[in-house]
Amino acid sequence: MKKRSDVVGVVLLLLVLLVGPLLVPVSVAGAAVYAVIYAVAAIGLSLLMGLAGQVSLGHAAFFAVGAYTQAILVTRYEVNGVLAAVAAVAMAMIVGLLVGLPLLRLRGHYLALATLGLGIIVTVVAIETPFLGATSGIFGIQKPDFGGRVYDSPDEYLWLLAPVIVLGIILARNLVDSRIGRALGAVNDSEVAAETLGVDTFRLRLKVFVLSAGYAGLAGVFFAHWLAVVNPNAANFALSVEFLLIAVLGGLGTVWGAVVGGFAVEFLDEGLRDFIPVIVPGASGEVQLIGFGVILTLVMIFLPGGLHQAFRAVTGLRAPRSGSVPSAPASEGRIDPDQGKIPTNLTSQGSPESVGEGALLVREGRPAPGTTLLEVQGLTKRYGGVVAVDDVDFDVAAGEIMALIGPNGAGKTTCFNMISGVTAPSGGSVVLSGQRIDGRKPHVFARHRATRTFQNLQVFSSSSVLGNVMVGRHLRSRVGLVRSMLGFAARTEERAIVAAARQMIGMVGLAEDADRPAADLPFGRQRLMEVARALATEPDLLLLDEPMAGLSGAERRELAGLLRRLRSGGMAIVLVEHDVEAVLALADRVAVLDDGALIALGQPDEIRTDPAVLAAYLGVEDDDPEAAAAVRDLAAEDAEGAR
Amino acid sequence: MSDFFQLLVAGLSQGAIYALIAMGFAAIFSVSEIINLAQGEFAAMAGLVALSATGAGLPLPMAMMVALLTVGIVAVVMQRLTIAPVKKMTTLTSIILTLGVSTALKALMLLIYGPEARGLPALPGSNFVVAGVSIRAQDLWILGITLVVASAVVFFYDRTVLGKALRACAEQPVAARLVGISPRKATTLAFLIAGLLGAVAGLLASPISLTQWDSGLTLGLKGFVAATLGGLVSIRAAVFGGLLLGVLEALVAGYIDSGFRDAVAFVVLIVVLVARPGGVFNRQAQARV
Amino acid sequence: MSLQIRDVYAGYGRLEVLHGVSVGVEPGSIAAVVGANGAGKTTLLRAVSGLLRASSGSVRLGDRDVTRLGAESIAAAGLAHVPENRLVFPSLTVGDNLTLGAWTRRRDKTALASRRAQIVEYFPRLAQRLGQAAGTLSGGEQQMLAVGRGLMARPSVLILDEPSLGLAPRVIREIFAALARLRSDEGLAILLVEQNVRAAFKIADHAYVMDRGRVLMAGEPSALLDVERVQQAYLGGGYVRVSVDPADEPEAAAPAKPESLPGPAR
């Protein structure tokens, strides 16, 4: 899926790499070789940092693994260059996998520092291992030789590099715009929300980490052949910093940023090496570092989005990954019948604006109304000495709306967090469709056809409304990382995803906002968007945490209508709300929490007049302990009777 | 057996240097959740400034004072110019940002002082031998001064109102503001403390390890590893971590292979991060919910 | 010093939570602000104490406009905010928490000890715990500590965010009794945000009911508690009428009546 700007970029790049060297001095072409090689590594790093949100301060380690593997295979074992390259990239990816498995469990800065340690360990291992040539390294690597021509001048090497980097760019761009790219972007914006929509963040991050190691390894292969020598400097910290600078300067997560950054940094490097000894006589050594350091610092303070941010500001282009996939026309309700994953009920609604009467999102295979879907038993959460949720039991059946109410601090959201896997319970069990899921991650909850919305909105703010809801289709689509990169197979599925997302958006009444940036919407409409996003997963169980907050009266009525229709379709809905009036009118059953304990469970009419509930909301009469105790006993009896 | 003790002495001496650097990391992180990768540069800078000062004729104690003053000022200026303006500072951002600053500082020192490694004159005293173990006067100075400095820092945080105010800032920044404590000012003070700690480390280490423009790299990284053993927040744990790391390195270098010395720290780092990110010595591994 | 909040609009980013709120408290009186979750009560307190910047409107301490000041400066100006969830400094001792409460007056070391003794008198439970780490205290004790900490700098205005949250009725009574004493002994202007309407209305001289970022009603607590609209704001229609027993007087001496009511009730 190529955008016009990508095509223009590729053409320009090819011009620069194929024709450019003939026009410039050899030294410039030589610098360009390094620029391209480092850019390849930086593309991988930029994907890792921008897409997976992970910083690697030791990326030169994978670069070195690729370089050393290539060097050894080609010089010691006389393996064919191309075969060796495949092995070298594979080797880098294997090391990436082994390292990523334990390290990617770490968050943020822990990972960054662990990778820094990794880089240094690889350097030390390279220095100390005779097989790797110790400090001298491996030398005598020959220049590539294809079809009778030896590619040993900068011009020729650039011709050799051109298809490699172009391919690298195309694959990376495809990934950024794909289902996987979208999922990772969502993880960056709100990891918890992405997980509850079914995104397995650990596995995805690991895949991108391994991919970035592969890019670095590939760069290492070309480095080895160009330099003819590979020594421990290939893994050194300064090189990792340079890769980081390229990625940051270009703009994290932007593939073209890494390419432009590569050229910018290399030429900066050359320029400084020439320039500084003029100003500071006698200066020698790694003087260009001062430029690197100053630029990295300034970019982080003033232009964190890098050159890409500046470019966008100047030309007014849209943000990367805005969900701006070529879409089916909004009014067209037709879904590709071959997909078979979208229930045909969806297509029979007619105009997305009308709030019709029929059942919504019926799904074959959903348990019959009345079947227990969710069983919560003895659910407890302790934080140190504080018991936030205390031994709560309730069930939810298909085709019912259950309300969960209670005063502030009663533990309602904590219950939701435990049920949906966001928090692990201290005790008790959560059984969904017969399977225990307590303590499992939220994407497991999602895989069991359940999802939730959030009290503190978890909007994917770098996407449009459509982009947000499309993430909801993650589990209802299948194209994985490799197919995403290759591009062509994904197009059909993407169209289906877009169409389904637009249906959901229409269902909640946001059709005219579909292409706006999600962050621009008023608060209440963002809530509706979260609901649409949750519905896009086609759940059997839906947990809604204060979906009505911020909605006008009319919007609340519409939402209530929508929920009733979903109930008719057999969905089970659990609702936390503070608009108690609205919720009592809507719910089939009500559970009341106070101070972590379940004090009432029953029909709305019973709850309305339950003295324990009143006491909880207004405050217990504290100068009459006997009366208070009596009220509580009464409440306990009521709760028992209602089960 | 005297080999073992010899390694132990060398390890403790080097470990004390790491401990000082590690305390600097903890001082800043505990107040602001910022990881300052330029911590090592404070040490290198102190050594180089003192070398210039002695080269210009100043007696050693004065040269050291000048170095401490300079580094203190640099640390505060660094915080005001590069840290304070960033509106949305996360730990990760602070890593990349301070990495940039540290790179620039390194290169600046290269430009000013050139690439050679030089050492400050050792502090006065004679070396002696005890039970087959040779102990340098400098080792005693290092251990002694580190002990004094560490005690002073611990006293500061445990007993003085200002130190407690800094801890309060770290634990509950909102409540700290509500009683009138400014987290901004606290961070500046923390950087000053970290700068001085780094400077002391650099001055003490210079006679033995020599100082050059990029001495800060490994010193800073290893001090960082030592600090992580305390979860980056505990001063005491940073001291223990530093000493422990120094001894481990010396033993590995002595008994296994001196080439793997540098790898020890980072293997330890990865193991600790994967096994107990909250720190090995940190008793209150309280999660910030 | 009085606290006057006029027409304050405030929110988080693009989400506006307060839509023109006006509340006032006079010295020697307690004003309660009640309302359901999401009404904006916590946001109101944050806007007052400077943790949050009001986008428009004004906050005045006495005759001083403090709307644009940061939290640290407002604390120094004589306002103490006891935050939601108490936020004691957990690894510091009770004594140290109190000492830090007097940060804006730390120069005056002699007064510190006597002030601490005074605070402990209001909250005797803290006496045996002075050397204990604050994080090990029970919820009620932490709440007392948080209030005591706020009082250390001798503020003129005290604002509290849901001090009764998670506490047993008896403890709530102790704390609120202390607040009533403070009103008369120290002439504090106290703004009390609460979800526990009963307990709050018992000691309040004046009350405000907030709903979705606006003041719905204001007036005498006893009058308000009978009003169906308050119950509606919490629970919806058709309820058993709840009323306060008029024989149940607050324990402290009769409070001074506020001199001016800030703005008409809706």
Image (spheres, coloured by chain):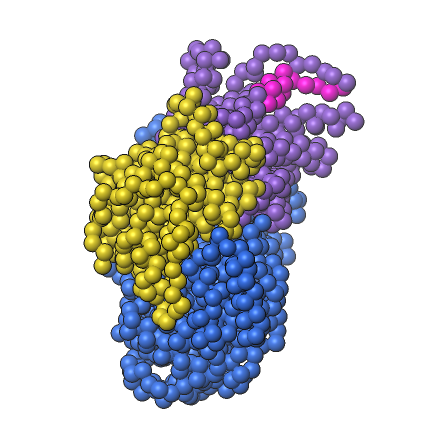
Chain colours: A blue, B purple, C yellow
Residue at position x 66%, y 44% in the image = A130
Residue drawn at the location 39% of the way across and 69% of the way down: C239
| Residue A141 seen from this side | no
Dominant secondary structure, magenta:
helix
The outermost residue toward the right is: B1
Q: Quadrant of the N terminus of chain C?
A: top left
Q: Residue B77: percent from the left, percent from the top?
A: 36, 30
Report whether A590 appears left or right of A17: right
Q: Residue furthest front?
A: C247
- Residue A383 on the magenta span: no
**Left of A569 or right of it: where is A438?**
right
A463 to A569, vertically: above or below: above
Where residue A484 appears, as percent x and y from the top left, is 45, 71
The one nearer the camera, B166 or B246, is B166
Left or right side of C53 for B129: right
The residue range painted magenta reads B132-147
Q: Is residue A358 visible?
A: yes
Residue nearest the observer in this picture, A563 or A339 = A563
Whole-percent x and y of residue C44?
Answer: 32, 50
| Image quarter in which the C terminus of chain C is found | bottom left
Classify C174 as above or below B162: below
Tell me what residue is drawn at x 28 percent, y 46 percent: C53
Taking the spot 26% from the left edge, 49% from the top edge, the residue there is C23
Please tell me which residue lies in front, A13 or A255.
Answer: A255
For residue A334, what is the image quadrant? bottom left
**B76, above or below B145, in the image:** below
Q: Observer-nearest residue: A587 or A237? A: A587
**Residue B138 is a magenta residue:** yes
Percent x, y for residue A410? 48, 59
